[in-house]
Amino acid sequence: MRLPTPLLAVLLTQSLFAAGGAKLERTITVSSDAIVEFTAISPKGDFIAGACQDGQVRLWAFPSGELRQVFTLQDQRISSAVFSADGTLLAVGGNRGAVKIWSLPSGQLKHDLKVGASVIALTLSPDKTLLALAKQDQPAQLWDLDVGRIITELPAKFSGSSSLAFSPDGQWLASADGDTEIRIYESHTGALRATASDLLLETFAVIFSSDSKLLYAGGADRTISAIDVTSGKVMSAFPKQSYVVGELHRSSDGKSLLALYFDERSFKNPVPALVWDTATHSVRSTFDESGITPNGGGFLKDGRALITNSAGPRLQVWSLR
């Protein structure tokens, strides 16, 4: 059911091209208690989910900016949100251990889980039967959604996991763990198959290549490493940057990576976002707008990268070729 939008004013801005080639696509205005802290963008680019300060997740259609749904975790701060690979599910985790998964576009609640600790990261398998979740300072868990039970806890040795990812072919699950190692498991059993031990600092973002043969990992070492999935060996590294890698998003054709960075001195400090060529490890495009700190991103089917940022009670949506 579509909701009325008295709290939402959509400013249909003209096509504005800012310095650096970024295009301001939409500015969405929300109420002052609903400032968007971070976003998730659906794989088809048709929805933007915003985790808001009032503890709700708002779902806007893109590019119209129309508010479609409002979801809640009942007085919990939203700590993680992710779409399924086909965009028909939205999984949301909270800081008190709630995990809810809704069907889209209906908004029907499909799964309601209690995991007992703050949820750091979530990821859904391509076939939507598995959920992997990372809890604060605890081993990550692999859930069978068909029966609603835990298959296994992943054997992280120290301080839990900060990022999780399923491979596009559904065969592998990767976890970036607090002991600086990256572990790759068989997705349906949780059996450990490879470990990447060459990274000396913690990884905060992992994503598989489109052919599932490589795992891209970025974090405190300020670079992106390409890891062989079967051996765990680092095959190559992208040029080192000035900031920590916080998020990685892959284009549907596998040719580009969107890297969102952060300044460890303050998450609010303005930082750039880069679109990388996965074949040459060169920068395709740079988003570096004055005073802007990205808080989410993803790719559209046409190859454009979407980048969001919050400016007071406004959510801005930019595109970058």
Image (tube, rainbow, N blue to C red):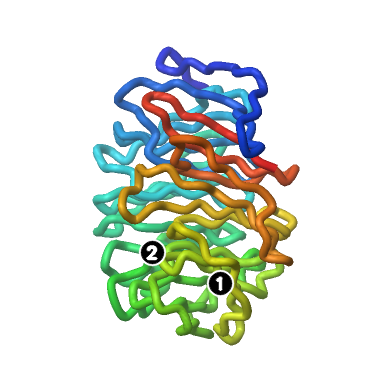
User: Label 2 crowding class (10 Å Cα cut-off): few <14, some 14-19, many 20+?
Assistant: many
Query: Identity of the amino acid at label 2?
Result: Ser
Rendered residue at 45%/78% (across/down): 199
Q: How many marks?
A: 2
Q: CA distance from mark 1 to mark 2?
A: 16 Å
Which of pointers 1 and 2 indicates the residue nearer the eye?
1
Tag 2 or tag 1, which sits nearer the N-term? 2
Q: Is residue 53 left or right of residue 301?
A: left
Mark 2 = which residue? 162
Q: Secondary structure at mark 2?
A: strand
Q: Answer with the quarter of the image where residue 51 lies.
A: top left
Residue 18 spot, x, y in % from top left: 61, 30
Q: Secondary structure at mark 1?
A: strand
Rendered residue at 57%/80% (across/down): 234
Question: 135 and 1: which one is in front?
Answer: 135
Residue 316 spot, x, y in % from top left: 51, 30
Task: Report the disc number at residue 225.
Answer: 1
